[in-house]
């Protein structure tokens, strides 16, 4: 039995679409409908029954339904022993594309316990091979990140191609995030060495000189031409926010001699900040462009390659995001909504303009690496909490990044503190967690991913068992009355889902907006998001609790639902009796029903 609540307003009814087609229920062999359209006499309800509402009709036999992978990978339940062959079966009732990882996971754990927190992996030398990428996809990677600070154009292109091939050949929906270099001050390449050790008391030279061949011993290139001019003798020079510390002792033309005062490992292209009298010197940083000329070339490349997310480093204001968005819109001639812009919160300026930056962006990243170099480390946790909360309030996905499992670059098990840190990010209900060096160049990328996955699952389960619902105020984000209606529907649907303990919420969404409004509510059950385009499906992969599927759907919701039930049931992904709530951005209704 279907029970539904529908809202009709003339303002929100799509022009050109006949109301009866949308608003009236159609009894089918499997669902008897009781609806209460506010503007229609109840007697008219059944009049619209049509033969094609029969889910067994041939109309949908070519239906293809594509579930997202990975977001559903369970704690250790899916190992590499899972057969990872992707077999699109095109015979009638089994016309559904599903990768075996998702399928196995849904079957084994039931969908109430699928993973809600999404996982981003930075791809680097140890994970750029096709098989290694596939292992990450099997392990639950939802988004592959390429950091434009490292690697060549050909290398980036190769990684993008491989991820795309993985999606095509194996049925995954791994999204691609390109992360700009930004123009903050950083070291050069260490002349090809993977790292260099700076010992206490050593004198190192930081130089803006262009060295033709090999770097002289204990010499570091600096990318910023004004460096030697700007630093003063006595300044503290911090590598990666204090991983290594130097004191400036002498300036000789383009060379700056520095004494190592805190020893440590220097990594290629590590970030540099300098401090004077206990304060970060940032006058020059404030003048550096957020998007450098190299970044613009990289962005052109990203647009041409059709990446799903552009993460912008060292965002200082909302203006830069707006400027970029209008550029992308112009470049891609209207296809602008295909690339989401993620603002990286990693500088003092970004904190000063936090809300307007997040409003202007499509999401944010708490980039704790550089953030911890620009504000005192002890302030990073509260900033993280604030950004995560604000993003949820403003309905933007948020990623918590950097050093989540830093020790696993070298060791196969995490520290207890790292596990506690991940737990905190999951408990804050951030949309996604990110691996950097752990997956780019560490020794245990798959193990690190498994830790993220298992800790996420465990904390989410604990949270549900304890029935914890943090009392977060969700302010209205919609600017039009139809937006407000969608928002209210989502808020109510999520609340009903919790109270009724339903197994899943189904949402039909063209742009992904309604799915993200549901995700914002962080309901107890997973959200199956059905969308028509592969790019929306991939982008939904970053958001908390969403399991995106791609399918082509008709304007007839009842029909869509019946098709989906049938297709999912044919693959044992749902079963008769499961309680679901269905909402749609095509039809303003909330339906509650048992799977027939
Ligand atoms: N494309 C790449 N090629 C080589 N090394 C990479 C690449 N991407 C990342 N790495 C390595 O992984 C480390 C961590 O990655 P990330 O946090 O993204 O960069 P960074 O440390 O420069 O901010 C980098 O310092 C670098 O050593
Ligand atoms: C994610 C970050 O940015 P990147 O790795 O590009 O420095 C960070 O600083 O935490
Ligand atoms: K970067
Ligand atoms: Mg950074």
Image (cartoon, rainbow, N blue to C red):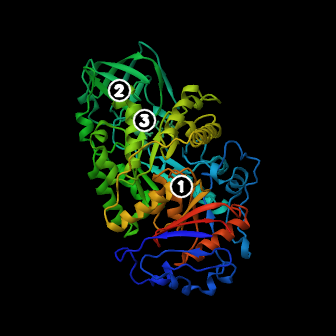
Q: How would you rate the neighbour count of disc 1 (Cα within 10 Å): few for under 14, some for 14-19, many for 20 or more?
A: many
Contact, mark 2 vs mark 1 (Cβ under 8 Å): no
Q: Point out the tag, 2 or 1, that comes first from the N-terminus.
A: 2
Residue 351 location, quadrant: top left
Residue linked to disc 3: 368
Which mark, by number, is residue 376? 2
Question: Disc 3 to disc 1, how far (Cα)?
Answer: 22 Å
Crowdedness of circle 3 by 10 Å Cα count: few (<14), some, many (20+)?
many
Q: Position of residue 230 (x, y in %)?
A: 24, 29
Q: Residue furthest top?
A: 201
Q: Is residue 221 visible?
A: no
Q: Which mark is residue 541?
A: 1
Identity of the residue drawn at 46% across and 60% down: 490
Indicate the quadrant of ligand 4 in the picture: top left
Which of labels 3 and 1 is toward the front?
1
Above/below status of 558 relative to 521? below
Q: Position of residue 390 (x, y in %)?
A: 37, 45
- Does residue 461 lie above or below 581 as drawn? above
């Amino acid at each position: 039995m279907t029970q539904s609540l529908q809202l009709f307003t003339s303002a929100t009814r799509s022009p050109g679409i006949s109301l009866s087609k949308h608003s009236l229920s159609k009894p089918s062999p499997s669902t008897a409908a009781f609806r209460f359209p506010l503007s229609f006499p109840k007697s008219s309800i059944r009049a619209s029954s049509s033969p094609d509402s029969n889910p067994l009709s041939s109309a949908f036999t070519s239906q293809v339904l594509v579930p997202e992978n990975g977001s559903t990978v369970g704690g250790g339940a899916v190992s590499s022993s899972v057969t990872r062959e992707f077999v699109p079966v095109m015979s009638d009732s089994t016309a559904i594309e599903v990768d075996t990882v998702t399928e196995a996971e849904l079957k084994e754990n039931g969908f109430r316990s699928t993973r809600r927190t999404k996982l981003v992996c930075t791809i680097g030398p140890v994970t750029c091979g096709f098989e290694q990428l596939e292992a990450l996809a099997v392990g639950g990677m939802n988004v592959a990140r390429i950091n434009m600070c490292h690697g060549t154009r050909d290398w980036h292109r190769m990684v993008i191609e491989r991820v795309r091939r993985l999606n095509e050949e194996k049925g995954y929906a791994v999204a691609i995030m390109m992360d700009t270099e930004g123009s903050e001050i950083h070291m050069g390449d260490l002349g090809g060495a993977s790292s260099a050790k700076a010992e206490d008391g050593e004198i190192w030279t930081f130089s803006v000189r262009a060295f033709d061949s090999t770097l002289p011993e204990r010499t570091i290139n600096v990318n910023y031409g004004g460096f030697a001019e700007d630093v003063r003798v006595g300044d503290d020079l911090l590598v990666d926010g204090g991983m290594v510390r130097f004191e400036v002792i002498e300036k000789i033309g383009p060379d700056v001699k520095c004494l190592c005062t805190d020893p440590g490992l220097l990594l290629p292209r590590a970030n540099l900040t300098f401090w004077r009298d206990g304060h970060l010197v940032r006058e020059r940083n404030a003048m550096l462009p957020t998007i450098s000329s190299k970044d613009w070339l990289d962005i052109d490349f990203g647009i041409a390659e059709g990446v799903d997310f552009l993460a912008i480093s060292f965002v200082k204001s909302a203006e830069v995001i707006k400027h970029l968005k209008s550029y992308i819109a112009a470049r891609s001639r209207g296809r602008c909504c295909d690339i989401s812009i993620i603002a990286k919160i990693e500088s003092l300026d970004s904190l000063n303009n936090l809300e307007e930056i997040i409003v202007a962006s499509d999401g944010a990243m708490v980039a704790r690496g550089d953030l911890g170099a620009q504000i005192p480390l002890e302030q990073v946790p509260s900033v993280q909490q604030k950004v995560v909360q604000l993003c949820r309030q403003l309905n933007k996905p948020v990623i918590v990044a950097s050093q989540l499992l830093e020790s696993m670059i070298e060791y196969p098990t995490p520290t207890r503190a790292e596990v506690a840190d991940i737990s905190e990010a999951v408990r804050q209900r951030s949309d996604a967690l990110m691996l950097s060096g752990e997956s780019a160049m560490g020794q245990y990328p798959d193990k690190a991913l498994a830790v993220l996955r298992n800790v996420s699952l465990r904390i989410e389960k604990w949270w549900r068992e304890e029935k914890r619902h943090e009392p977060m105020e969700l302010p209205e984000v919609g600017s039009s009355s139809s937006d407000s209606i969608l928002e209210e529907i989502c808020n109510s649907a999520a609340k009903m889902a919790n109270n009724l303990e339903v197994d899943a919420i189904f949402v039909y969404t063209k742009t992904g907006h309604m799915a993200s409004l549901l995700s914002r509510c962080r309901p107890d059950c997973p959200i199956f998001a059905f969308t028509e385009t592969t790019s929306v499906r991939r982008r939904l992969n970053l958001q908390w609790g969403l399991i995106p599927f791609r399918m082509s759907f008709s304007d007839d919701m009842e029909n869509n639902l019946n098709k989906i039930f049938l297709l999912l049931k044919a693959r044992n992904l749902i079963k008769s009796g499961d309680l679901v709530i269905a909402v749609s951005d095509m039809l303003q209704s909330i339906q509650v029903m048992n799977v027939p």
